[in-house]
Image (tube, rainbow, N blue to C red):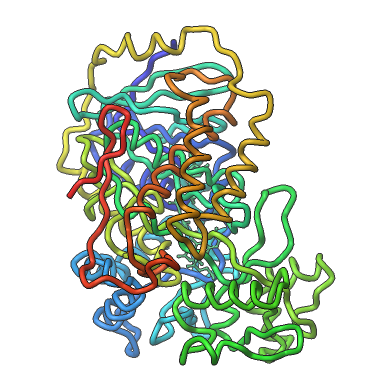
Amino acid sequence: MKQTKYSAIVIGSGIAGLYSALKIEQQLNLPDGVLLVTKSKLGESNSYYAQGGMVAVLKDNKNDSVESHISDTIKAGAGLSELETIKFISENSDKVVKDLLTFGVEFDRDENGNFTLTKEAAHSVNRILHSGGDATGRQMEIALCNAVKNNPGITIYENTTAIDLLVKDNNCHGVILYINNEYQAVYSHTVILATGGLGQLYKYTTNPIGATGDGFAIAYRAGAVLQDMEFVQFHPTALAFDDEKNHNRFLISEAVRGEGAKLCDKNGYEYMINYHPLKELAPRDIVARANFCQMRDNKVPNVFLNATVIGKEKLLKRFPTISEKCLEKGIDISKDLIPVAPAAHYFMGGIKTNIKGETSINGLYAVGEVSSTGLHGGNRLASNSLLECVVCAYEVAQYLKNKDLSRISNNNFDESLSKYDTQTQPISSDTNKIKKELQNIMWENVGIFRNGKNLQIADDKVQNFLHLFENKYKLATKEEYELKNMLTTANLIIKSALKRKESRGSHYRTDYPEIGNISEHSLIIQNKGEINFVK
Ligand code: FAD
Ligand code: SIN
């Protein structure tokens, strides 16, 4: 197997990965350079599709304050958001926005050159930066990808899948990569996982095809502590059509509701008043459950969003991507109701880190959606994710400034690497069929509403599939590696959901509908192949 080394390895080219690589490269002591690995083409990620925007508590926004952002985030987080983390991220948002501008990132401004700020659900003031109207992620990704490509200190491996970490005695020494049927061991004492989320575990999701939860599974196998794995966020308003290319559903941003759009049934009845006083702008979990109930009770495949009140001119200016996408489906959003339905969107749980991205394994860091910093708690406040990505990417690089990233020697991993020299057969003749079955199992049993019986059904089925991978290290295709990671991650979600016998934030159990008295994170770690809950 080919073996190389780098001063730092960043895995993932979403906003967290790109910005981490750029900030780390700005440090002084990088004799072996930075390697950026990404499993499809550079920039393909959840980040690319982010619409609504990024929270920023700007110093010159007199209507806003860190205290107000903290208060909104805590309210949404259902008792599991951590004050110090929110405070840190909020306080650093202004500085990081200014730094992003130096890498070519831009946000929409008014005619006086001031940023235009919008509002989304459960925010008490307008504090969300956006770009290209409703193409915030795409604009940020394009700028950061260009900066990375133009940076000679960063080596890029595209179409390269990280499959496992090289860990000994709780120290991370590097990663094993899979590139077109070949393997490469890359050594480094600084490995940053920025592999994003897991929406593809579900039948309906806003996440593109690559969001298969690899980072959670990789970290779990390596022995890292993971946190709050039961907390999947479902977005209330995905366009109710399946996208063939990305195997997902296009998002109709919450910002459309922020600008005044109303949810209704096919007769135009605006039902949100029956669910929450904040109606369309109630926290995301409440709106997603409301839409789900409306669909279930009326036996219909979708509800509707009425954006006509916003007016054609504003719709085209603020939501050009959404307007165009809907028009492709024959829907003129200035005149027609938009068919929408909930879909898996974001993952609040993840690899437990502190604000510097440190995990429980030395030398392993996690940034972005794959991490669980304590910001989001049981329910993420809209547009806090991109902010977390950039503040934590900035911070991990700051922290590494004081670390010695100098040349490293290979530890002896011959035994681990020899597993990849063996011949291998496909685990199934139809990986895609198992993947689809898993997505159905997760949607039906581990979705917006859960209960012990259904979680147990899901558990039994997932265990059966997991047996196919028992003691198999080398697999036949990238899709098999992804499927193994999806099953591993599904197992962690199901076990955590079974353990949490209450309803909190996005985790709603019909057999335990009340919130418990004590708000506690759930922490898990792998021990001899078994899931252990850490008290
Ligand atoms: P990602 O952007 O998902 O990037 C992960 C990267 O890792 C990808 O490049 C992927 O290919 C790579 N990767 C994964 N596994 C491997 C592997 N094994 N080996 C190599 N590479 C790998 N949040 C907001 O704050 N505001 C919004 O407006 C907003 N809108 C959204 C709209 C949509 C449609 C979606 C899906 C999400 C939205 N979110 C939004 C959430 C937000 O976009 C994500 O949480 C955030 O972009 C995650 O960034 P990331 O860099 O952590 O991960
Ligand atoms: C949206 O635009 O509705 C998504 C915002 C988010 O997920 O934070």
Report x, y in % for residue 499: 32, 53
Q: Position of residue 43 (x, y in %)?
A: 55, 46
In the picture, the quarter occupied by the N terminus is top left
Task: Looking at the picture, tell me which residue is in the foreground, 390 or 420.
Answer: 420
Rendered residue at 47%/59% (across/down): 346
Is 173 placed left or right of 390 in the picture? left
Could you tell me how many numbered marks the image carries? 0
Comparing 10 with 94, the one in front is 10
Query: Is 349 on the left-hand or right-hand side of 149?
Result: left
In the foreground, 247 or 460? 460
Front-lying residue, 298 or 475 = 298
In the rendered view, does 18 fall on the left or right side of 342?
left
Whole-percent x and y of residue 421?
47, 8
Task: Using the rendered image of the protein, determine whether residue 326 is visible from the camera's viewpoint.
Answer: yes
Residue 105 sits above or below residue 429 on the image: below
* In the rendered image, the vertical position of residue 219 relative to residue 535, given as above or below: above
Identify the residue shown where x is 28% and y is 42%: 365
Q: Position of residue 251 (x, y in %)?
A: 62, 65
Q: Residue at x 43, y 56 (%)?
A: 452
Residue 230: which quarter of the image?
A: bottom left
* 137 to 476, vertically: above or below: below
Residue depicted at x 55% and y 12%: 424
